Amino acid sequence: MNGVFHPTAQSLPPLPGAYVLVIRLDAPLPPLQAGRYLYCGSAKGPGGLRARLGRHMKKGKKVRWHVDRLTEAGTVEGAWVFEDGDECALVARLSHLPVPWPGFGSSDCRKCESHLLAWPDGENLDLYH
């Protein structure tokens, strides 16, 4: 599973896939501490990865999903994208990382404890292999 990192949504394909969104919180957002977080999601609707990640990376949007609270409060640094990927497979690949908020983004998922993971400084992600 090879991921390609995109700092903005403009270069993303309008294809379905999965992604790992990098969000930095400079201040706490209860129950989360300041730090970097990874949100694993999927984009299967119209516009695919470009539309979904474009929404996540935009400020001033209506808060509709859990992740919108984070993207509005923090800074989206970019995302690794996996065309035709699976968000639960990404969570499994990153399972060595701490789960800061059980159930976050995974209320409709029976496999994952959470789709949000903390990314401590110095921790290797290994998303390129």
Image (cartoon, rainbow, N blue to C red):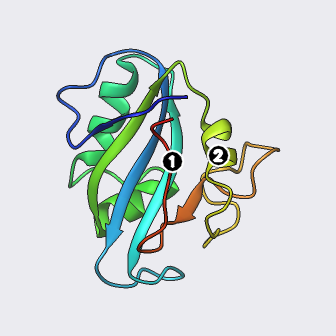
- Indicate which disc, 1 or 2, sits on the residue closer to the N terminus: 2
Classify residue 92 as left or right of residue 55.
right
In this rendering, position of residue 52 left or right of residue 93: left
Query: Which residue has dot 1 on it?
Result: 126
Give the farthest residue toward the front: 129
Type of amino acid under label 1: Asp
| Quadrant hosting residue 99 | bottom right
Q: Quadrant of residue 56?
A: top left
Give the percent coordinates (x, y) of residue 31.
54, 82
Q: Which residue is mark 2?
A: 93
In the rendered image, the vertical position of residue 126 relative to residue 117, given as above or below: above
SS under mark 2: helix
Q: Position of residue 48 (x, y in %)?
A: 40, 21
The structure residue drawn at horizontal position 26% and vertical position 47%, both measured from the top left corner, is 57
Q: In the image shown, does 79 or 124 lie closer to the viewer?
A: 124
The foreground one among 33 and 93 is 93
Are the residues flagged by discs 1 and 2 in contact, CB closer than 8 Å? yes
Front residue of 79/29: it is: 79
